[in-house]
Every structure is written in structure tokens, then in C-alpha cells.
Image (spheres, helix red, strand yellow):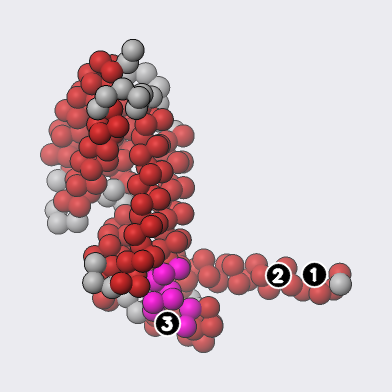
Amino acid sequence: MTTAATTRVPQEERTRVMRARLLEATVECLVEHGFAGTSTTLVSERAGVSRGAQLHHFPSKNDLVLAAVEHLTAVRGAELAAAAADLPTGPTRTRAVLEMLGDHFASPVFFAALELWVAARTDATLLAAVAPLEQRVGREAHRLVVDALGADESQPGVRELVQATLDLVRGLGLATTITDDARRRGRILDQWALVLDTQLKGATP
């Protein structure tokens, strides 16, 4: 029993590490080559994993991508939570929240997720995996922004204001895929921070 357990743990750890390398490589390939340009061969080469080992864990591109969807969801949530923990207090906090969201929606993990969104539009199997996880990411991001801004959603219009914030910054992130217009984005976020401070303070009992 002791010998078997001792042998099993390293093997489980090796499996975990190999799967993680393959999933990270999948995300990198999605960012660099898009969904159509991502192949199992390209992923295994990027991960430094033999083709046979990759096929053992993920027999097809579909298996690999579906696992990457779950992986991306976890990574995006963890990155946002870590960034939120470093937000400043005081009068600059609202603008810092917007900057945090702007950075997230212009990050490689978001661009990888975007590739999956586009592919899922015409792939029922992928859509079935992507849709519920994106809904979960959306709920978690909404709650994080509510907490970060100290917003009181029991007040009329506040929930919609928070959601509008997410929609706005996500849209700016989408624009970044075409051209990097950081100055324009900065001006928009400056103005939106003023709107949020005014509206949220006005909504406070």
C-alpha cells in the first residue's frame, strides 16, 4: 500500500504538469494563430510534449479546446481577483478599477477567450461548453466590480450601471484587437470614472 501510494503521487503530479503545459500552450496558440490556426501538432510542439503523450491526454483538437475553455475560465477569474486585491483606496479607486478591467479585456487570456467565442458561434459542441462558463465569468466579474466600487445594487439603476461598465470596457478591449488606441481609451475611462463616482455617490442612502 505504501509503495503503491508513493509511486502513484509522482505520476499524478507528472500528469497534472503535462496537462497544464498543454493547456497553456493551447491558450498561447489561440492568441498567436487564432482558433483555425491552432492544431494539436502545434500545441504539442509549443508545450514540448510528444505527440503521443498529447494524444493520450487529449485525443482530438476538440478535446483539447474544451479543456482549454475550463482552464481559461479559471485563469481569467484568478487574474481579476489578484488585480482587485491590489486596488488602491481613496479618490483614485474608481479609475483604478476601470484600469484593472481595461487591462484584463486587453490581455492575452481575453483574446484567447474571444477566439473561442467566435468559433463557438458556428460550433454547437463548443458553444455548449463556452456559453455556461462565460456566464459564470460574467457573474463573477460583475460581483467583483460591485465589491470593488462599493456599489449598492439595492438602489435603482446601480446594477445596470455596473453592467454598463463591464460592457463598455469589454468593447474597448475588442477595439484593441484591431488597433491599439490607448490614449483614446484612457480619455474614455477618465470620463466614465467621473460618471461612476457621481452616480454611485448619488445612489448612496
Task: Say few, some or many: other residues with alpha carbon within 10 Å of mark 1 (under 14 / 14 to 19 / 20 or more).
Answer: few
Residue 167, quarter of the rendered image: top left
Q: Which residue is mark 2?
A: 10
The amino acid marked with disc number 1 is: Thr
Say which mark, if any, is on residue 6: 1
**Residue 62: horizontal and vertical position, in percent?**
39, 77
Task: Say few, some or many: other residues with alpha carbon within 10 Å of mark 3 (under 14 / 14 to 19 / 20 or more).
Answer: few
Residue at image position (15%, 34%) is 188
> How far apart in space, not on screen, are marks 3 and 2 (Cα)?
26 Å
Q: Nearer the viewer, mark 1 or mark 3?
A: 3
State the SS at label 1.
Answer: helix
Q: Which residue is mark 3?
A: 60
State the SS at label 2.
Answer: helix
**Residue 182: horizontal and vertical position, in percent?**
18, 42
Residue 168, quarter of the rendered image: top left
Instruction: Say which of 140 and 1 sits in front.
Output: 140
Residue at image position (20%, 23%) is 194
Residue 26, quarter of the rendered image: bottom left
**Residue 201: horizontal and vertical position, in percent?**
28, 16
Residue 39 in the figure: left or right of residue 2: left
Query: Please, which residue is most extreme toward the top here?
Result: 205
State the SS at label 3.
Answer: loop
> How far apart in space, not on screen, are marks 1 and 3 (Cα)?
32 Å
Figure check: 157 above or below 183: above
The amino acid marked with disc number 2 is: Pro
Figure check: 133 above or below 20: above
Figure check: 17 above or below 95: below
Numbered disc total: 3
Q: Earlier in the sequence, mark 3 or mark 2?
A: 2
**Magenta-tinted stretch:** 58-67
